[in-house]
Amino acid sequence: MSPFKTIRGMRDFLPEEAAMLRFIESKAREIAKLYGYEEIITPVVESYELLAAKAGEEVRSRMYVFKDLGERMVALRPEFTASVARLAATTLRNKPKPLRLYCIGSLYRYDEPQKGRFREFWQSNFELMGSEKPEADAEIILLTSRLMEAIGLKGYSFKINNIGIIRGIMDKEKLGEESQNRAFQLMDKKMYEDALGIIKNAGISDGGLKTLKQLLEIKGNSVQNVIGEMEKLLENNDEALKPLQKLEKILKIVLSTQNLNITIDAGFARGLEYYTGMIFEVYVPELDIAIAGGGRYDRLVEAFGGEPTPAVGVAHGLDRMMLALKEQGATLDFREQCKVAVVPVSEDLTIEAVKISERLRSEGIPSEMEVVGRKISKSLEDADRRNIAYVVIVGEKELKEEAVVLRDMRKKEQKVIKINELAQKIKASGI
């Protein structure tokens, strides 16, 4: 590999892409403010033990793991929730509940690079800790929908389940946690026959296996019909019925507030081991990968030495949402265009041109200074090519009158304007 190429699975963001990513990030921050979430910043490098504890075999096998100079096993974070749970178990353990926390940043997994999947990726992560109520789960879904809407995504839909339903069946059959987790890993990859093989070998009864097979077939977007079908199948299993009833309450809250496109999929699972209840993912028609996902994890904080703390959260794939916007043909220019170029007619007037540039900036007007010594005609061509709205031409004759020439690049008109009126004139144009 050439030392002058990006490492496989990593990428550069050019100005247009960086602006689009930051736009999506800014919307995530707006949503956080609307819902009362406070930002935390966690380390990119954490102890391997922490990150691996409940990540699931798939994530564990793809972590960037290394020994630091102190011979400690550390890893680049593959997701945020473990770090947030660590904080909740330690530094924030005595803070009033519920905790509403969010973080934004880059994450790392040694995945096979493909469309929408890179080894360095970006997420906004929202966690609500300290409530087991369905309204907490509903809030995470609703804020996710609001973010999708805020960035302008069309046709997004939710796939949802409660992992506790399948766990309830397996718990009743006394299946071990390891077998359950291996089965969920396979179900996450839609390898249902292999998952059922693991469950069968773990000792499930014929009746339990039959129920599970029937359950995995249930799917649909008519909430009442799907819930009714699942209730009928699980009527003799209280351990599976309770999480189903919880899911029904969550969806009742959500759908009474927003008219969302929701599919209940009883065979849907997610790869992380720490989920205990409702789980969901968000899709758009243009991509076959989830652009967001999350769920309930009621035992993770306790596993890290904290008090028993029910919790629910979501991760939004910022760069996947960016890809979805591109696929949908988003036409917004997300860059902050520089509004004004300041050009001295000769090198002798450079200091005056710099002063005028700084004066405009102090008024909050983005301005760039001609710094490569181009002649006026070339500077105007460059400004036109880059859609700069105004060019301020600093000439000796005008300076004697404490004025400059202001050229409107859209109208191809120019006027002599007093320097002390310049900022006001530019602001009045509404650009």
Image (tube, rainbow, N blue to C red):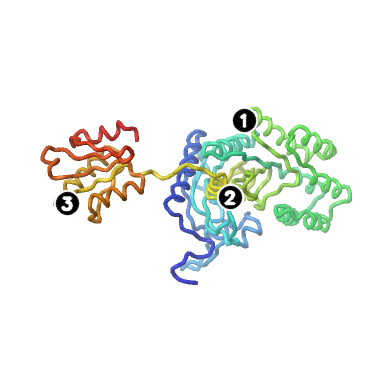
CA separation, marks 3 and 1?
61 Å
Mark closest to the chain's N terminus, 3 or 2: 2
Query: Do callouts 3 and 1 mark residues in contact (Cβ within 8 Å)?
Result: no
Residue lying at 83% horizontally and 58% vertically, measured from the top left: 201
Viewer-side label of 3, 1: 3
- Quadrant housing the C terminus: top left
Is residue 297 visible in the rendered structure shown here? no
User: Which amino acid, by three-letter code, is at mark 2?
Assistant: Gly
Classify mark 1: residues with Cα within 10 Å, few (<14), some (14-19) or many (20+): few
Inter-mark Cα distance, 2 to 1: 37 Å
Front residue of 371 and 223: 371
Q: Secondary structure at mark 2?
A: loop
Q: Amino acid at mark 3?
A: Ser
Q: Secondary structure at mark 3?
A: loop
Q: Which x, y percent locates residue 155?
A: 62, 39
Outermost residue toward the top in this view = 256
> Which residue is at the front of the view, 421 or 73?
421
> Real-space Cα distance between discs 3 and 2?
69 Å
Specify the label residue 258 is tagged with: 1
Vertical comparison of 300 with 114: above or below? above
Secondary element under disc 1, as helix, strand or loop, is loop
* Rendering coords of residue 178 (x, y %): 73, 56
**Residue of label 3:** 346
Which amino acid, by three-letter code, is at mark 1? Answer: Gln
**Residue 299 horizontal side relative to residue 422, left or right:** right
Q: Residues within 10 Å of mark 2 (few under 14, many from 20)?
A: some
Q: Which mark is residue 305?
A: 2
